[in-house]
Image (cartoon, coloured by chain):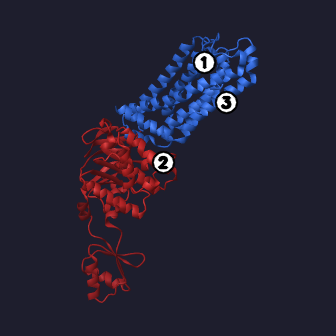
Chain colours: A blue, B red
Amino acid sequence: MTLLAAVHAEWTKARTVRALLMALLAYAVVVIGVSLGVTAGIGAGEAASPGYDAALLAFYGLNFGHVAVIVFAVLLTAGEYSRQTVHPSLVAVPRRGRFLAAKVVVGTALVLAVAAPTALLTLLGTQALLGPAAVGLGDPGVLRATLAAALYPALLAVFCMGVGVLLRDQVAALGLLVPFFFLVTPVLELIPGLREVAVFLPDRAGQVAVRLHTRPVDQFGPGTGLAVLALWALAGVLLAWWVLRRRDA
Amino acid sequence: MIEARGLTKRHGTRTAVDGLTFEVAPGRVTAFLGRNGAGKSTTMRMLVGLDRPTAGTARIAGRAYEELAEPMRTVGALLDSGAAHPGRTARDHLLWLAHSNRIGARRVDEVLDTVELSGAARRRVGGFSLGMRQRLGIAVALLGDPAVLLLDEPANGLDPEGIRWLRTVLRSLAREGRTVLVSSHLMGEVARTADHLLVIGRGRLLADTPLTSFVTAHGPQALRVRTPRPQALLDLLDAEGIPTSRQPDGALHVSGAGEDRIGRLAARHGIPLLELTPEEDPLEEAFLRLTSPAAGSSR
């Protein structure tokens, strides 16, 4: 019952800070915009080439959109420390586990609420541009990839919320997470010898589920990919909870 | 009722709070006095569970703060001037806090009215003056209509009118039977409000005493006296056994006798007085003496 009160408070906090809402809006705009733009530009040629993965192309914008997810998750968590609002937050909800749980529930729900319609609109929009090469939700794997395109950002947000609580500093958390997920992991995946390890990193594993076809380098299927990301998310939050309980606010 | 038992906080080798034991009783305003860095804020933070004590315990209404189900209904706290997100409006700030402890939205408007911020309720906190932020922080503390109030330097940033308002609020809260603990680094600020004093220096309790005993213990006011015949007055007061000393600017510093006696003595001996005024606030003086680093080391 008091967890519900804490969730209510976190919901009020999230909806009354404009930057958080802007980050979510930015996610939708970037994912849909980049996906549609890329499909319109090179979609026809890609669709004719061998090894074409309709979902990989359709959800191309995710690679950019997840920056907005990182920003959202970090503002929601580390932002409390940068603004020192964590003090009134913990005075109001002194059970640290309850505070963190409420925050993760609200943050995840908000990302999911934006990512789900964004995934659907992205698929429908991109396929409308492809004409005869288009796939539909009824085609094998397409519904699954679309669901994964909604779940992937939500799980990534959970992981980033954990990191935000651990680092307690907006700039440090953004400085670590944005380059890591935007530059480092995609490059690691290209390096032979490292790529077999890199596919287990949170974003790489999660994105396996957004493709229609598994590549030779992927050592697991879509379901396992999302599970690996979910494990990262769980580990991040558990570590954040463990540290949050022990240290001074 | 607030109870601290052997409350200690160490940061590495530095001891911020050193075995504090005290009780704060309801129905009166207790001033928590100490110089900057004496450990007041750290103590307050431990009372509400923000900092983990290295040793000792803190209880409010008989329980550890974290064990209170809806703590804002029992304890109202003002720490770091209320720390509100600059992008939120004053009302939204109070609203999320109200939701966290299942306090109705109507109460939000009530406390906004109490702290005279109703007109600014829908303005962003980022544009608030320090005084307005402080009032918002006090509104947060009052939100749950708590029996215990912990206010860390609530007068910071308030203008003279605001300070007078704060004094009235604190007194009426105590009169309603609530427990009110107010920290300050200025003796003068609380001398006219507090009923009881807790004085700390370098993390240790230096005094736990009613204000009246403190005033009695620290004696009468010293006087500053100016006269065209300082030597004559000095000799006269010496003869009367009143400790007197000459200041660099030629004025006399007289202690141990009031204005009436000095004035009459001077008149009887035909010594004109140009000035007869109280020196610094004796309470402030006593407080500074009590908390001076030298006093600490001699203990």
Task: Please say whether residue A199 is visible from this viewpoint.
Answer: no
Measured Cα–Cα span from mark 1 to mark 3: 18 Å
Amino acid bearing label 3: Gly
Q: Left or right? Give the position of A219 relative to B182.
A: right
Q: Is residue B124 above or below residue A141?
A: below
Point out which mark residue A210 bears. Answer: 1
Measured Cα–Cα span from mark 2 to mark 3: 33 Å
Of the numbered discs 1 and 3, the one sitting upstream in the chain is: 3
- Please tell me whether mark 1 sits on a helix, a strand or a loop: loop
Q: In this view, does B295 lie above or below A137?
A: below
Q: Which residue is nearer to you in this view: B289 or B62?
A: B62
Q: Is residue A149 above or below residue B5?
A: above
Amino acid bearing label 2: Thr
**Rendering quarter of residue A12:** top left
| Chain letter, disc 1 residue | A
Foreground: disc 1 or disc 3: 3
Amino acid bearing label 1: Val
Do the residues marked 2 and 1 share a common chain?
Answer: no
Task: Please say whether residue B158 is visible from this viewpoint.
Answer: yes
Measured Cα–Cα span from mark 2 to mark 1: 40 Å
Q: Name the residue under label 2.
A: B89
Quarter of the N terminus of chain A within the rendering:
top left
- Please tell me whether mark 3 sits on a helix, a strand or a loop: helix
Residue A32 position within the rendered picture, expressed as x and y whole percent measured from the top left: 64, 28
Quarter of the C terminus of chain A within the rendering:
top left
Q: Which residue is nearer to you in this view: B32 or B92?
A: B92
Q: Name the residue under label 3.
A: A33
- Please tell me whether mark 2 sits on a helix, a strand or a loop: loop
Residue B280 position within the rendered picture, expressed as x and y whole percent measured from the top left: 36, 69
Few, some or many C-alpha atoms within 10 Å of disc 2 (few <14, some 14-19, many ≥20)?
A: many
Residue B41 position within the rendered picture, expressed as x and y whole percent measured from the top left: 38, 48
